[in-house]
Every structure is written in structure tokens, then in C-alpha cells.
Image: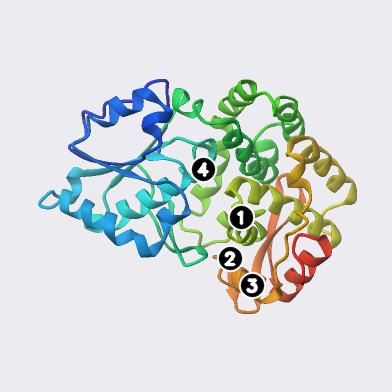
Amino acid sequence: MPTVFRNLLSSYSSLKYPILIFDRRLDSAYLPFKAWRKSFKHAFPVYAGENLKALESFPATMKQIITATSGVSRSAVTVVSAGGGSVGDFSGFVASILKRGTDLIHIPSTWLAAMDSAHGGKNALNVGEIKNQIGTFHHPSSVYLTRDLLFTQPRERAIEALGELTKTALISGEKWHKDPLNILLELAQVRDQHEPLQNKLWDLLPTTIKSKSRIVAQDPFDELGIRSSLNLGHTMGHIIEPFFAISHGEAVGRGLLFSLTWSKKLGFLKQSHHKEIIGALEKLYPEEWLKPQKNWNILENDFLKLASHDKKATGIASVNFVFIRKIGHVFNKRVRLSDFFKEAIAQGWVGEK
């Protein structure tokens, strides 16, 4: 799966029958985009966000796409996705089932999608309030990263990307960068300066993408337990993200803090390592990420419902949780959902009314 860095959007004139699915906000966010997408005979604007991935709303758009591709062979169709993570998930799912699978190209428009969700081939829809319950593996043939497009994103989108970036750094260690903690501290110095932060993220994209791709290549269909290391910070993150309506990046960032502290409590992560990592994250993350909001309160039934429906659940009583021993060394361990909830209470992230 080649990843190509481009300063200008391609015309894609070589594609036989391209179907563009795009975040409609891009028309106003990046002026060259509107002219470019008009070159597509079939272009479908969508509203980005979790509602796009709702199973209930999927058939309407899918019906339009099926009509547009009627009579066209599977090999001729290419689904081109332009947008953030939700648009990429939606488009990837469409490509995976349209005519039993068509070619797919991603053009991520957010930092989070550029460094994470556009790579790896996972696509999913949500069922009710539970994220990613219906999904497929369908790898894109190409991912195009456009600097001009990414730099149109507001500052909060760059900040949100720090959660997934940190996750990759902690999992990969020296394979991500020889000195991960120093890189995170360098990022912290420019966190509140929009353009310098974007420049830094752009410079780190190749390394970050390679680090994830290296893990995916060892376990492309998530069958060996290797790829599940990418879920570091996500088990808690997927609970608080929908419940408190926060961004995925913030949820992962908060989930990482939870995982680090629980790893220390259970003796997996040395206190000195924990102090060193937490010290860097306290400088890197926005202050509000570092502790629960005062009004955050999840009842046990709600917590267990969200946790047991998470894709890492192994049964109604347990879940696979990713712990960390040190930077570059994470591992999966089955834990009881009741113990998970007790730890969430102990850390103050959730609690009983």
C-alpha cells in the first residue's frame, strides 16, 4: 500500500470509473478542493462524524452509489475517499462490499486520519451507541497525503492527533524514533503554536505511518494478537468517547494515561518509567486531558455495557486490555470487566452516583 506525499491534488484522470465520497466541509475549508472534486462525474458529499457511520443511515447513501455504478464492472470502479476518520471508515466499508469489493484510495483531510485510520485496512459502522460493531478488512491501494489540505485544519484537529501519535510512539519505541520521549517534549514546546505544530506533525508522518504499517504487516487481519497492540489506550477511550461526546484523539490520550497508571499499579511498568512518560505527557497534553471532568460519572451498568461491546471484549465477563512494560514493549492481558471498572473508579475517570 503506497503512501504518496503530494502538495497538489491529483486529477485521477487515469481511473476508469471513480466514485468520490467526500466531507462536504472541504468545499469551504480548502478552495482548490471544490474545483477538483467537480472533475468527478459521481461525487457524494457526506456529513462527517459518528452519525455517518450509523448502520441506520447507511442504506440511503449506499443505494445512490449502487445506482451510480449500475452496469459497471467491479474492476473498473474505484472508491476515492476524501475526509477524516469517519469518512474513511464509511468509504472503506462501501468499497469493501460494493460489487463484492472495489479498489479504494484514501485522501485523509485530518491529522488523525493521515497518521492512523487511513492506514491498515479496517473499516466499520456503528450500531446504536456502540462503535465499530460491523466491519471489514479492505486495504486501500494508495493513500495520498496532501500538505496543503492538512494545513487547512484548525488547531484543535492538530491537538487531537497527539493522542494517536503518542500511542504509536509508546508502542514502537526506537522503531518510531531513537528518542521518543524527547520528540514528544519537542512537540510540547510548539503545542500552542499552530503552524509550528503542524510542521512538526508533517515531519513525523512518514515515521508514524511506517511504524503502524510494520505492525499491520505482521498481522493484517488481527488474528495473531500482534496487531491488537495498536489498541493501547483504546479500551478506556472507546468507553468515554461516545459517553461524553469527546473526540477520538482526546479519548485515546486520556485512555493512555489510564493504561499507564494501571500498568504501574499491577507492577508491569516500573515507577521510574511511569514517572518519565507521564512527565512528558503532562507537558504535551492539554491540561483538561490530564484529569477527569468533575461531572464525569458513569454508572456500572453503562460502563460494563460499553466495555463488553467493545471489539476487544473476549466474553461478557472479560476484555483484552493492552498494558505497557516500557516504551516499545506492550502486551495484551485478559482482565475481568469488574476489575476494569474498579480501576476506573480508583483513578477517578468514572464512578458511581
Q: Is residue 56 left or right of residue 114?
A: left
Q: CA distance from mark 1 to mark 2?
A: 8 Å
The answer to which of marks 1 and 3 sits earlier in the sequence is: 1
Q: Is residue 343 visible?
A: yes
Task: Name the amino acid type tagged 1.
Answer: Asn
On the image, the x and y values in percent for residue 263 come to: 79, 58
**Which residue does the numbered mark 4 point to in the structure image?**
213
Task: Name the amino acid type tagged 4.
Answer: Ser
| Residue in the image at 74% along x and 35% along y | 284
The answer to which of marks 1 and 2 sits earlier in the sequence is: 1
Q: Residues within 10 Å of mark 4 (few under 14, many from 20)?
A: some
- Of badges 1 and 3, nearer the viewer stands 3
The reply to whether discs 1 and 2 touch (Cβ–Cβ < 8 Å) is: yes
**Which residue does the numbered mark 3 point to in the structure image?**
302
- Of badges 2 and 3, nearer the viewer stands 3
Secondary structure category for the residue under label 4:
helix
* Position above or below: 102 against 332: above
Task: Residue at the far left: name it.
Answer: 71
Q: Which mark is on residue 312?
A: 2
